[in-house]
Amino acid sequence: MIASWKRQAIDGMAGTFSGAGDAVKAASESEVEKLHAKIGQLVVERDFLAKAFGR
């Protein structure tokens, strides 16, 4: 198990220092923006329904 973690760490470090992580980071930021938009939409819907049911 430790050997597996070590292998993953070495692979991850190589990607981090080679700049390959930038593409993953950009995709991750895009995903975060989509999730924030969805959270905002759900909050608005929840508030609307709460008012509609008289809470």
Image (cartoon, rainbow, N blue to C red):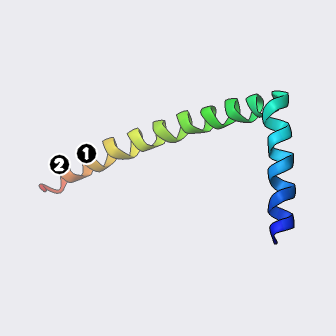
Q: Looking at the picture, does residue 15 appear above or below residue 8? A: above
- Per the image, label 2 sits on a secondary structure element best described as helix
Instruction: Identify the residue at image location x=33%, y=45%.
Output: 43
Residue linked to disc 1: 48
Q: Nearer the viewer, residue 55 or 1?
A: 1
Q: CA distance from mark 2 to mark 1?
A: 5 Å
The residue shown at (77%, 34%) is 21
Q: Amino acid at mark 1?
A: Phe
Crowding near the residue tagged with mark 1, few <14, some 14–19, many ≥20 C-alpha atoms within 10 Å? few
Q: Is residue 25 left or right of residue 40?
A: right
Asked whether, in this view, residue 12 is left or right of residue 29, the answer is: right
Q: Which residue is mark 2?
A: 51
Whether label 2 touches label 1, CB < 8 Å: yes
Picture quarter containing residue 17? top right
Percent of width and height locating residue 31? 61, 38
Residue reaching furthest left? 54
On screen, 16 above or below 10? above
Expressed as whole percent of the image width and height from the top left, the position of residue 53 reads: 17, 56
Q: Residue at x 87, y 56 (%)?
A: 7
| Quarter placement of the N terminus | bottom right
SS under mark 1: helix
Q: Is residue 11 left or right of residue 29?
A: right
**Above or below, 2 relative to 54:** below
Please state which amino acid type lies under the numbered disc 2: Lys
Q: Quadrant of residue 29?
A: top right
